[in-house]
Image: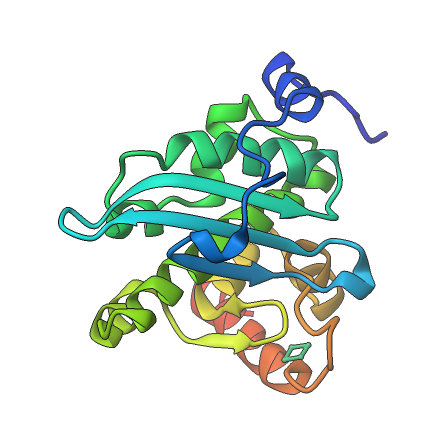
Amino acid sequence: MTQWVYSDTVRDHFLNPRNVLRDENPEDFDAVGRTGNVKCGDEMVVYLKVDPEALTITDCKWQTYGCASAIASTSMLSEMVRGMTLDAAARITSKDILAALGGLPDNKVHCSVLGDKALRAAIDDYYRRHGMEDRIQTLGPRVVCHCLNVTEEDIEHAVLEGARSFEELQERTKIGTGCGECQEEAQRVLTSFIEKHFGL
Ligand code: FES
């Protein structure tokens, strides 16, 4: 039976979310990253202010229509990235966030990737706005689903965590739940990682 057990840290960040964008003007920020699909009710937007000399994050705010787990995860993430360089922040994974939160129920883990993906999109946006496109290419692997910003690496992680069918992959990553155009390619990449890691 599913265990709906949230750590005290998750509850605290859900009930008292840090760094939510409220009165500030989004245009005062240096970069913005968006992920998710508002039709699914889980859109996430991350806003960054960046020290242009050190390329460190001086402020990270966010807004979401996401669930309690997405709220708690992004609240934690927004605290973790302050003072980090953009490159270091881009290397944060949903596993790092989960560790800081003391875990999430298995069926809510996928919600923790929303903030992480929106953050990476915001970092890419900063590089794009400042003529550093070469850094974007070094940050992440190929994007398979552009609506949900799901990469080959995300698919590989899902396989390593147990996804064996397209439905299981979708449950973990929400891949293909936007326009649907990526589904054939997603299935191909899924099969290749299952073969690579499990020889099936
Ligand atoms: S590209 Fe994946 S759902 Fe649109």
Q: Is residue 183 above or below residue 163?
A: below
- Residue 94 in view (yes/no): yes
- The C terminus - image quarter: bottom right
Say which of 65 and 185 sits in front: 65
Residue at 32 percent across and 72 percent down: it is: 128
Say which of 123 and 182 sits in front: 123
Q: Is residue 9 above or below residue 167?
A: above
Query: x, y percentage for residue 10?
Result: 63, 22
Residue with the most extreme top position = 8
Query: x, y percentage for residue 164?
Result: 65, 62
Which color scheme is applied? rainbow
Residue with the most extreme right position = 1
Residue at 47 percent across and 36 percent down: it is: 77
Residue at 56 percent across and 61 percent down: it is: 34
Say which of 134 and 22 sits in front: 22
Residue at 63 percent across and 83 percent down: it is: 182
- The N terminus - image quarter: top right
Query: Toward which corner of the image does residue 167 lie, by quadrant?
Result: bottom right
Relative side of 54 to 77, left or right: left
Relative side of 155 to 69, left or right: left
- Residue 157 in view (yes/no): no
Q: Quadrant of ligand 1?
A: bottom right
Query: x, y percentage for residue 83?
Result: 27, 34
Q: Is residue 116 above or below residue 83?
A: below
Total number of numbered labels? 0
Query: Toward which corner of the image does residue 71 lie, by quadrant?
Result: top right
